[in-house]
Amino acid sequence: MKDFNFYTPTRVVFGRESEEQVAQLVKNCGGSRVLVHYGGGSARKSGLLDKMVGLLNEAGIYTVELGGVVPNPELTMVRRGIELARAEKIDFILAVGGGSVIDSSKAIAYGVPYDGDVWDFWDGKAVPQSCLPIGAVLTIPAAGSEMSSSTVITNDEAGMLKRGINTDMIRCKFAIMNPERTFTLPPYQTAAGATDIMMHTMDRYFNAHQDMMLTDAIAEALLRTVKDCVIEVLEKPTDYRLRAQIMWASSLAHNDLTELGGEKDFTTHKIEHELSAMFGVTHGAGLAAMWPSYARYVMPRHVNRFVQFAVNVMGIACDYTDLEATALRGIEAMEEFYHKIGMPTSIPQLLGRPVTDEEIAEMVNKCSRGGKLAYGSLERIDAQAMTTIYKMANK
Ligand code: NZQ
Ligand code: ZN
């Protein structure tokens, strides 16, 4: 078990009517001039946005609204937000939405106090030294950005480059989570969100260190819970109990809890980000399309870990005479689960067509930064391995 340093400073305000506390939470963070950032319209339609603005204004807090964040949020919007926040002397950003809105808010928060080009942070030319404080009112459990240290932005000015950076300072000061707010999610977003939640834990569970008994048990419980609840919630979208389990799992899957004592891998995430950047697909669906191929590629060298996953998460009976068959059965069971919830398990299922060899080469080139970078703690995945995995997923 590796030594670790666990820091998860986000205040979680969870439950029915939790959003009533928004003004006090903002005030506690010293916010008096708030940029309320949101997406394409779901928060406006549900009345949540107006409610948040109303509560803030009633408490004497000045607000400016900026909507229109797209899934896989873009740099152009971040620049607009920075300009607006500076002009309005904003001192707090409230994200009302999902991972895309929270990440766009985080990027604006980094950009406001920075004199240079905000993309420098994702380009590796500068490291953030400060940021505005932000809070989130979560409407979709998926990305886990409400408690994570990550900010994933797509540079739409430079050929749709999707990149992430991590710092502790950017973590949300608070996350308001009312499971009732997720009742309106379309089935595809519910399923893609659950897939992403599970992958945040799987990208940590499949790692080089295998003596983290408690962390493994937490991870396995989280995976089983989300797997069971999402199947049921697709039938019963307004079931509070089910929505609540999934929403809480979203945060726990990506606040680093399920990597303690190990070393996160995140290869599936890295290779998926190229798909969602290039083709604008939903991140969670892209993960489902890539993981089975990644898993089949690495499994023969990590049979025991995949057996543990098959037995403890997917409920497969262990065949002690053929451990590799048990491991493979676990991957197949995961694919069956993805299909059951309407997720793709290959690139053609995701996009409606296979990608070309040139598109694979472009994704590999971007992901590996021209062959210079490799990813993964379970196993290093370099440009050559990435090409193999994309090709396996392209069948
Ligand atoms: O834009 P609106 O109209 O709000 O619609 C959204 C959007 O179309 C809709 N939606 C959200 N809440 C809803 C709702 N529709 C009905 N009812 C509601 N209550 O759902 C769609 C998807 O929203 P989005 O915010 O894009 O989803 P998600 O949370 O999956 O975020 C995806 C982004 O987060 C990044 C992904 O790469 C992607 O860019 N990630 C961020 C991470 C982080 N910062 O820690 C980690 C993740 O691995 C991920 O990479
Ligand atoms: Zn993810």
Image (spheres, grey):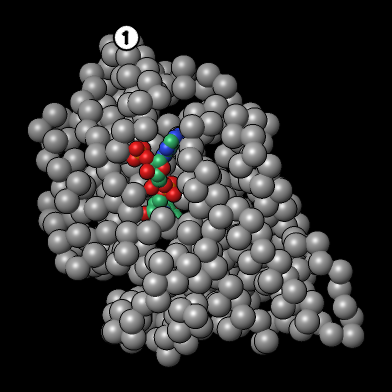
Side (left or right) of 365 relative to 172: left
Side (left or right) of 245 relative to 353: right
**303 w.r.t. 315: above or below:** below
> What percent of the width, then of the height, locates residue 224?
72, 53
> What percent of the width, then of the height, locates residue 142?
50, 48
From the viewer's side, name the closer residue of 316 and 374: 316
Neighbor class of circle 1 (other Cα within 10 Å; few <14, some 14-19, many 20+) is few
Side (left or right) of 59 relative to 178: left
* Residue under the point 48% across and 40% down: 186
* Residue under the point 78% across and 82% down: 325
- The residue at which mark 1 appears reads as 58
Q: Is residue 290 visible?
A: no
From the viewer's side, name the closer residue of 335 and 303: 335
Q: Residue furthest front?
A: 352
Of the 4 image quadrants, the one containing the N terminus is bottom right
User: Is disc 1's CB within 8 Å of ligand 1?
Assistant: no
The three-letter code of the residue at mark 1 reads Glu
**140 w.r.t. 196: above or below:** above
**245 w.r.t. 224: above or below:** above
* Residue under the point 33% across and 82% down: 356
* Residue under the point 63% across and 29% down: 240
> What percent of the width, then of the height, locates residue 115?
12, 51
